[in-house]
Image (cartoon, rainbow, N blue to C red):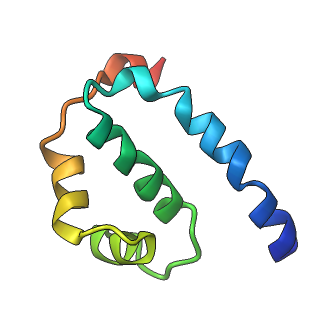
Amino acid sequence: MTAEQLAGLGPAFTAYLSSFRPCFPRCESFAHLGTYCRGLISDLPRKSVEPMALAGGAAVRTLQEFLTHHKRDHDALLG
């Protein structure tokens, strides 16, 4: 795929992620899902929290807290 084609997928990916909104009781938690998922599919050489947060414009500590402490409905996410 070209860079232009990949950039065009952004809105579709955002729409796809929005289907998971009911799995997160707090809006703040859901907002970090996009940063985390985009980090996972990025071309970053390391897929750990720090580089993903920095690339996504989020505070490292905030993304760490999203993964470790924020509530989410795991069964609904898997479904």
Looking at the rendered structure, the number of numbered marks drawn on it comes to 0
**With respect to residue 65, does 53 lie above or below?**
below
Q: Residue at x 80, y 59 (%)?
A: 8
* Position of residue 42 in the picture relative to residue 28 (left or right): right
Q: Residue at x 28, y 75 (%)?
A: 50
Rendered location of residue 35, percent (x, y): 43, 58
- Residue extending furthest left? 69
Q: Nearer the viewer, residue 56 or 73?
A: 56
Q: Which residue is drawn at 16% across and 53% down?
A: 65
Q: Residue at x 35, y 17 (%)?
A: 75
Q: Nearer the viewer, residue 6 or 48?
A: 6
Rendered location of residue 27, percent (x, y): 32, 35
User: Where does the N terminus fall, quadrant-wise?
Assistant: bottom right
- Residue extending furthest bottom? 45
* Position of residue 45 in the picture relative to residue 75 (left or right): right
* Position of residue 62 in the picture relative to residue 47 (left or right): left
Q: In which quarter of the image is residue 55?
A: bottom left
* Position of residue 51 in the picture relative to residue 62 (left or right): right
**With respect to residue 63, does 69 lie above or below?**
above
- Residue extending furthest front? 27
Rendered location of residue 59, percent (x, y): 24, 69
Rendered location of residue 32, percent (x, y): 35, 50
Q: Quadrant of residue 48?
A: bottom left
